[in-house]
Amino acid sequence: MRRSLIIMVKQPRPGRVKTRLARDIGRVEAAWWYRHQMTRLLRNLRDPRWQITLAIAPDRATQNRHLWPSDLPRLPQGRGDLGDRMRRMLEAPPPGPVCLIGSDIPGITRRHIAHAFQALGTHDGVFGPAPDGGYWLVGMRRPLPRNLFAHVRWSSPHALSDTLAPLHRHRIARIDTLADVDTAADLALSSAPQRLPEGQRHRR
């Protein structure tokens, strides 16, 4: 059965993406950073061991052929809160192990993804924790537990523990802890592109 890697992405539109980072460095700069981070992530994670599918927001952006690699399948994230959308994306691929990640974690490598799929060989689920109490990866065998993501306090220090609470009867693995980029301080600590090319700086 084919391994599926779902990457949740957003249209890199100033004012609509990385809003916390935009407050620190400007809307155009934040959108530029996100677009280049996303491009680098997609390039680095291509691997014949899994099929990458893009889960795109907003839904209408799936039709923008200039934003996304033409060879990667695209799905609209659809309506609902983050849990609703994540569950929908985890259930979308053909039968086989599936992992889902965000697109704003500069440290993700093919090694991390391979480790997650390896863990699913002996576990029901796998999580990649984040330092803030959330997580950058979730992988599950299917069918998914009915109450997965049902009572999660998103964007809080409780996101991972809330997600794990109904899974206490399942075998769950954890892999490396990685951080996303939400603020200028996070950006300074990351290995991602940090500066606009000369002539493209537009503070707003």
Image (cartoon, helix red, strand yellow):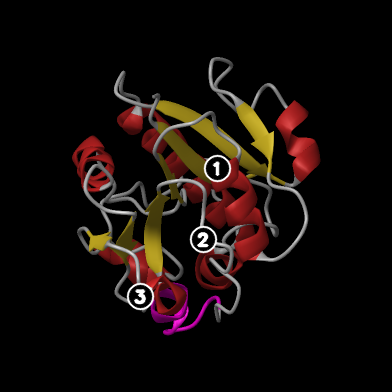
Which quarter of the figure has residue 170?
Answer: bottom left
Query: What residue is drawn where x is 35% and y is 46%?
Result: 193
Q: Which residue is mark 2?
A: 145
Determine whether the residue tagged by mark 3 lies in a helix, strand or loop.
loop
Relative to 9, 165 lies left or right? left
Task: Farthest residue to the front: give it.
Answer: 169
Residue 12 screen position, x and y as percent = 62, 45
Foreground residue, 135 or 194? 135
Residue 107 screen position, x and y as percent = 27, 51
Which quarter of the figure has residue 98?
Answer: top left
Of tags 2 and 1, the one toward the viewer is 2
Q: CA distance from mark 3 to mark 2?
A: 11 Å
What amino acid is found at the position of numbered circle 1 in the picture?
Gln
Q: Which mark is residue 200?
A: 1
**Is residue 80 in view from this perspective?**
yes
Q: Quadrant of the N terminus?
A: top left
Q: CA distance from mark 3 to mark 1?
A: 50 Å
The first of marks 3 and 2 along the sequence is 2
